[in-house]
Image (tube, rainbow, N blue to C red):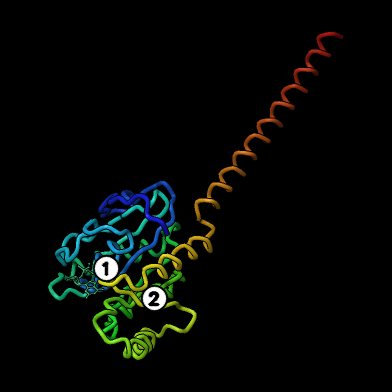
Amino acid sequence: MKIKQTEFVISAVRPNQYPEDGLPEIALAGRSNVGKSSLINKMMLRKNLARTSSQPGKTQQLNYYRVNEEIYLVDFPGYGYAKVSKTQREQFGVMIETYLRDREQLVLQLLVIDIRHEPSKDDVLMYDWLQHYEIPTCIVATKADKIPRSKWDKHLKMIRQTLGADKSVPIVLFSSETGLGRDQLWETILEAIDDAGMSAAQRNAEAEEAAETDIEAAQQTNNATEQANDAVQEDTAK
Ligand code: GDP
């Protein structure tokens, strides 16, 4: 994926603030401090567009980043921060469930997990929501540089097991430090967009088809009008 342009678009607190241009969305969920912002920056080749270590427990919002005017990366608030109030937890729940249930543009959810640790209860809950709403999901095991290569397989197995994710769910091994997994993750994202029929080419073809149908309909209306006019002229001539 060639990055031509990246942009922070909005911190949305309500669905009516989500972008309305219909571009496909890739959302990221994970515990606070798991490395989501670093991952977003690495994917976009930007040093600091996504705020790293943003204060946990702040207003619950979805941060929208646009890539090449083609794709949105949507950063969920990090969860699992101990000092978050009950009200904030509830707000998070409502916001995320509504998004997962209603957002048609969502083509792939990345569940970001620290490769060193067993997924938390919140991770499992998030994974269960994704299954429930039948959202295509990719697990991203990040901070891979923090454990020796020889342990990667064992940790990936442990992550799969704790989440209850079968082999059909892809896992991408990632490191924002080294760039490991970056190409593979872009590939997975582009495939998901294709599968959803939402690539730029697919959307253009659809728009062209719709325009052609409009032209045909307009031509039919014209023909009908001409015939009606002819009929009137014939009547007048009689
Ligand atoms: P967020 O709260 O999920 O957005 O997490 P951040 O992206 O702010 O990362 C939290 C901390 O982990 C920061 O100190 C990052 O530098 C560090 N970090 C994130 N990803 C990686 C990684 O892949 N490798 C290493 N070694 N550190 C990372």
Name the residue at the left extreme. 83
Residue highlighted by disc 2? 172
Asked which quadrant contains residue 232, the reply is: top right
The location of residue 170, given as percent across then percent down, is 44, 77
Above or below — where is 88 with respect to 206?
Answer: below
Label 1 beta carbon less than 8 Å to ligand 1: yes
Q: Which of the two labelled residues, at mark 1 and mark 2, occupies the earlier sequence position?
A: 1
- Number of numbered discs present? 2
Is the C-beta separation of discs 1 and 2 under 8 Å? no
Above or below — where is 37 with respect to 226?
Answer: below
Instruction: Say which mark, if any, is on residue 36.
Output: 1
Question: Which residue is nearer to you in this view: 108 or 175?
Answer: 175
Classify residue 142 as left or right of residue 169: left
Asked which quadrant contains residue 107, the reply is: bottom left
The location of residue 59, given as percent across then percent down, is 18, 59
At label 1, the amino acid type is Lys
Question: Which residue is nearer to you in this view: 181 or 36?
Answer: 181
Question: Which residue is nearer to you in this view: 194 or 211?
Answer: 194
Q: Residue at x 40, y 67 (%)?
A: 183
- Tell me the quarter of the image containing the N terminus: bottom left
Q: Residue at x 23, y 68 (%)?
A: 78
Looking at the rendered structure, the secondary structure element under dot 1 is: helix
State the CA–CA distance, disc 1 to disc 2.
14 Å
Above or below — where is 137 with respect to 154?
Answer: above
The location of residue 68, given as percent across then percent down, is 39, 50
> Nearer the observer, disc 1 or disc 2?
2
At label 2, the amino acid type is Val
Q: Quadrant of ligand 1?
A: bottom left
Above or below — where is 9 with respect to 150?
Answer: above
Instruction: Say which mark, if any, is on residue 201.
Output: none
Looking at the rendered structure, the secondary structure element under dot 2 is: strand
